[in-house]
Amino acid sequence: MKVEGILLISVTSSNVRAIGYNKPKKLLYIQFKDNSVYRYTDVPESTWRMFQTAPSKGKFIWRSIRDKFEYEKLT
């Protein structure tokens, strides 16, 4: 799936379907299992790298993304 021209990659997670990152703009995209897509702004590349390798995507979102970055629900 593409969102705003960014290809989202599927992940193994009970809550997250796919993730993507726009490096130049520091935008993180998360598609949840209910197909909603959120865009988080000003996310450092280091956070994106840690998110990709996190054993639990949901826990990582709660601990390191949610309430740390501004976001917008796209769909």
Image (cartoon, grey):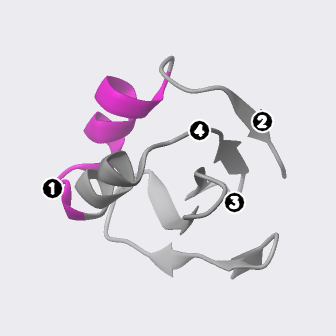
- Mark with earlier residue (4, 1): 4
Disc number placed over residue 72 in the picture, else none? 2
Residue drawn 69% across and 46% down? 38
Kindly report the distance in space between the C-alpha atoms of the residues bearing marks 3 and 4: 23 Å
Kindly report the distance in space between the C-alpha atoms of the residues bearing marks 3 and 1: 21 Å
Q: CB atoms at circles 3 and 4 under 8 Å apart?
A: no
Q: Secondary structure at mark 1?
A: loop
Residue drawn 77% across and 36% down? 72
Q: Amino acid at mark 1?
A: Pro
Q: Secondary structure at mark 4?
A: loop
Q: Which residue is mark 3?
A: 35
Residue drawn 66% across and 56% down? 25
Q: Which residue is mark 4?
A: 42
- Mark with earlier residue (2, 1): 1
Q: Is residue 56 left or right of residue 21?
A: left
- 38 up-or-down from 24: above or below: above
